Image (tube, helix red, strand yellow):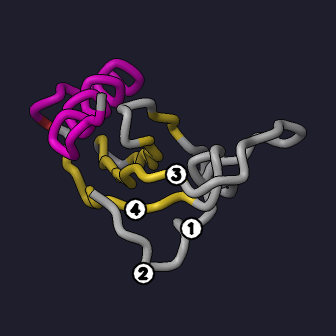
Amino acid sequence: MIATLASVTDAVLSDAAQRTGVKKSELVVERAEAVTWADGSLGCPQPGAMYTMALVRGFHIRVRAGGELLDYHTSERGYFVLCPAGRAVDPAADGVTTR
């Protein structure tokens, strides 16, 4: 099943609240957009891991929790990862249709 930006954002906000202890209602979504990731790492490759080498549609969501910025990368199926600073890779170039 394909997730919507709204449903994935809600799941990400729940995760961010749990991780940070900041109330969900106090979190600020600074960015939420449909993107296409260059591969199965969703723009957050882990050293030594292997990923499918196909374009992956998904979303890029940044959440501010107090003074902390959380960078979430998701697939269009709703799977998401919290990408640590310094490991994030930009989405594939525009021109690829995303939902």
In front: label 1 or label 3 = 3
Q: Nearer the viewer, residue 12 or 41?
A: 41
Q: Is residue 86 magenta?
A: no
Q: Residues within 10 Å of mark 1 (few under 14, many from 20)?
A: few
Mark sitting on residue 90:
1
Q: Earlier in the sequence, mark 1 or mark 4?
A: 4
Q: Nearer the viewer, residue 50 or 83?
A: 50
Q: Secondary structure at mark 4?
A: strand
Q: Residue at x 45, y 34 (%)?
A: 80
Mark sitting on residue 35:
4
Quadrant the C terminus occupies: bottom left
Q: Residue at x 82, y 39 (%)?
A: 50
Q: Position of residue 22 (x, y in %)?
A: 26, 28
On the image, numbered disc 3 is attached to which residue?
56
Quadrant the N terminus occupies: top left
Residue at the extreme left of the image, as rendered: 25
Disc 2 residue type (three-letter): Gly
Cα–Cα gap, marks 1 and 4: 9 Å
Q: Earlier in the sequence, mark 3 or mark 4?
A: 4
Q: What segment carries the magenta color?
A: 2-25
CB contact under 8 Å: marks 3 and 4: no
On the image, numbered disc 2 is attached to which residue?
95
Q: Is residue 12 left or right of residue 42?
A: left
Q: Residue at x 47, y 46 (%)?
A: 73
Q: Is residue 69 left or right of residue 47?
A: left
Q: Secondary structure at mark 1?
A: loop
Q: Secondary structure at mark 3?
A: strand
Disc 1 residue type (three-letter): Asp
Q: Nearer the viewer, residue 26 or 13?
A: 13
Where on the picture, by quarter, is residue 94? bottom left
